[in-house]
Image (spheres, grey):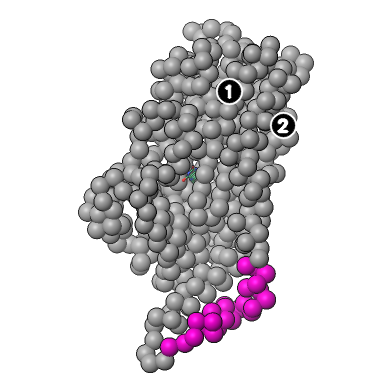
Amino acid sequence: MAEIPDKFDAIVIGAGPAGSASAYYLATKGFKVLVLERGRSPGSKNVFGGRVYVAPLKEIFPDFEKSAPIHRWVTRERMSFMHGNELVSLDYEGNDHKSFTTYLSQLAAWMALKAESAGASIVSDITVTGLLKEGDKVIGIKAGNESVKADVVIDAEGVNRLVLESTGLVQALKPSQVALGVKEVVKVNPEVLANEFGLGEGEGMAWSLMGDVTSGLPGGGFIYTNKDSVSIGLVMLLDSAISGANDEVYKYVERLKTHPKLSKYFKDSRIMEYSAHLIPEDVSSLMPPRLAYDGLLISGDAAGFLLNLGYTYRGVDFAAYSGYLAGKAIEQAHGLGGMSAANLLVYTKLLDQSFIMKNLKRFSGTHKLMRNRRLFTAYPAMMASLMRHIYSLDYESQKMFNTVLGSAKENGMGPFTLLTDGIEVMRYL
Ligand SMILES: Cc1cc2nc3c(=O)[nH]c(=O)nc-3n(C[C@H](O)[C@H](O)[C@H](O)COP(=O)(O)OP(=O)(O)OC[C@H]3O[C@@H](n4cnc5c(N)ncnc54)[C@H](O)[C@@H]3O)c2cc1C
């Protein structure tokens, strides 16, 4: 790090969506910012499924749509329950531009470039190994034997957060707090996107799947259509994957691509990329006890800011917006006279007023639903048998109510279980 000056206004750990959003905001306000990224370049270590909600990003980067790597606007949503060779799907075709598909590697690189163009210094291939402290105050970072000072450090190192752990600010991750996500990006024939997915120019699909996709383990599958490729993968609670997975997790993705009802979407496809990453799951237990310390703010996945509702994942917009709010908090603390914990507390106020904390509070118990195994076993099976009884008939048609109860019974559930599970789902979602 010889060429790096030894003092900055702010140092950001990690050039993911959270880190680059902070760096961009602070640089546009004239702060001297250094971003340190352990990957070979910004974007090289970032993994996600495929869809980003655009509104928060447009607020952070007003010219977002002009140059950001938007692959396709999601105009088609599909939610499927998989049981054996049967697939029950709910399909929604809209036409607004609220979310888009992309590669996170491209989006993170684009965000880092925006920060750099605004004046931030970004140095890759450097792993921050700890925080530099003077008493309780954070005064910079350590990277191996070297150190760099700053008035404030923003920790945007993502879910693994080894820096925070080494400083004793958070405990080591437990398997029950996170999920494991695995993903392939596969090149597909453009005709497949048009004919099988039914997508027009620039239109995209976000598809979530539950049931046999994870062999009934808590979690689900996802498929997103990019410009000329498809992202396909699945997410499983880590502790369930460790104790219950009957195969290596990448084989589940392979099985998904070759499933009789899905293989047509992956005909002649070619793997371009394979990745795996952890995801915050039990968000409330993952959130550090404090988000603002003397000279330190925590944002993005490192702070546990992720919303998983089963049918959508929101991590990138949450991370980027929390990084942006960290930048705003630093600007305000600067106006108040410095980066003390008291001045930086404005960060938690900004978060509380934002969609991030409102959403996280609203859906605070959702991860508990993941522990109801019936949602991943009996219900997908019930949906399939319900459809079979309604549509697959020779002479007699059945009354819907009786068919629902009959399908539930076939899968080991009585009216009381349906009622209590229904109440639980309504309570948390
Ligand atoms: C399989 C999967 C599917 C997902 N699907 C979606 C989706 O469809 N939509 C969505 O919005 N979100 C999704 N997410 C969540 C989303 O990817 C994250 O919430 C988001 O990337 C968090 O951004 P971040 O900047 O906080 O962390 P990260 O993206 O993890 O970035 C952290 C950065 O810090 C760097 N770093 C870490 N430690 C150090 C260190 N010590 N020194 C220097 N640099 C360091 C890393 O290399 C990385 O570049 C998904 C996640 C996974 C794993």
Look at label 1 and name its amino acid: Lys
Can you give x and y, in whole percent of width and height, for residue 140 in the image?
64, 15
Q: Is residue 19 above or below residue 202?
A: above
Membership of 417 in magenta stretch: yes
Q: Which is closer to the viewer, label 1 or label 2? A: 1
Residue at 47% x, 48% y: name it.
182
User: The C terminus lies in which quarter of the figure?
Assistant: bottom right
Residue 306 in magenta stretch:
no
Give the percent coordinates (x, y) of residue 44: 43, 32
Q: Is residue 350 left or right of residue 120?
A: right
Residue highlighted by disc 1: 328
Is 74 above or below relative to 357?
Answer: below
Which residue does the numbered mark 2 point to in the structure image? 290
Residue drawn where x is 45% and y is 60% of the image? 79
CA distance for labels 1 and 2: 18 Å
* Left or right of residue 421: residue 31: left
Secondary structure mostly seen in magenta is helix
Q: Compared to 339, does 359 lie above or below? A: below
Q: Residues within 10 Å of mark 1 (few under 14, many from 20)?
A: many
Q: Secondary structure at mark 2?
A: loop
Residue 285 position, x and y percent, is 70, 44
Amino acid carrying mark 2 in the image = Arg
The quarter of the picture where residue 90 lies is bottom left
> Where does the magenta region start and end?
397-422
Q: Residue at x 41, y 33 (%)?
A: 107
Give residue 356's mark: none
Residue 339 visible in this rendered orientation of the protein: yes
Q: Secondary structure at mark 1?
A: helix
In the image, 386 versus 16, the foreground residue is 386
Return the residue nearer the eye: 109 or 129. Answer: 109
Q: Can residue 225 be seen from the camera position used here? A: no
